[in-house]
Amino acid sequence: MKKKLLVGVLIVSLGINLVVLGDWLLVKRGTQPTAEEKIALSEMVLKTVESTDYQTIASKEKIIAIDRGMDKSKGGAFPYYFGVNVYTDTQTHIFSCADAACATMKSDGTMYSIYKDEDRRLPFDQ
C-alpha cells in the first residue's frame, strides 16, 4: 500500500515539474526579458522619444503611456524581437529598431488603444 502511494506521489510530482518546466521553456523564456535585455529595452524607450516619428505623433495626439516588451516567438534576430508601444488617447503606435544597430527607432504601425474607451489607470488628477 505504501509503495503504491509513494509511486503515485512520485508520478504526480514529476507531472507538475514537467508542466512548470515546459511553461518556463516555452512561454516565459521567450517573453520575459533578462537583465541585459531590460537595459536594452530601456535604451530603446529613450531612442523612441527622441525619434522624429514620435515627435510627429506627440504634436498630433495626447501621449498617455509608453510600454516596452519583447517576443522571441515572432522570429527574427536581435534586436528585432524588441518593441516599444506608445499609447495615446486614440491609438497605440508600435515602434521598433530601424536597423540592426538600433541607432534609431521607427514607427511600424498602429493598433487599438485601451485609452480610447477607458480612463487612465492611475488615480491622479488628469
Image: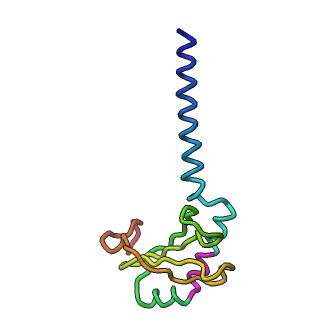
Colour setting: rainbow
Viewer-nearest residue: 100 or 125: 100
Give the quarter of the figure containing the C terminus.
Answer: bottom left
Q: Quadrant of residue 106?
A: bottom right
Q: Residue at x 36, y 70 (%)?
A: 114
Q: Residue furthest top?
A: 1
User: From what the image shows, is residue 36 above or below residue 90?
Assistant: above
Viewer-nearest residue: 4 or 96: 4
User: From what the image shows, is residue 89 above or below residue 68?
Assistant: below
Q: Main secondary structure of the magenta part?
A: helix
Answer left or right for 109 relative to 51. left
Looking at the picture, how far across and down is residue 86, in whole percent? 48, 76
Q: Quadrant of residue 92?
A: bottom left
Q: Residue at x 34, y 70 (%)?
A: 119
Viewer-nearest residue: 113 or 27: 27
Q: Residue at x 50, y 80 (%)?
A: 108
Residue 45 in magenta? Answer: yes
Q: How many marks?
A: 0
Viewer-nearest residue: 55 or 19: 19
Looking at the picture, how far across and down is residue 51, in whole percent? 57, 86
Looking at the picture, how far across and down is residue 118, in whole percent? 32, 69
Q: Residue furthest front?
A: 75
Q: Residue at x 60, y 49 (%)?
A: 25
Q: Quadrant of residue 39?
A: bottom right
* Residue range corresponding to the magenta coloring: 44-51
Q: Residue furthest left?
A: 117
Residue 69 in magenta? Answer: no
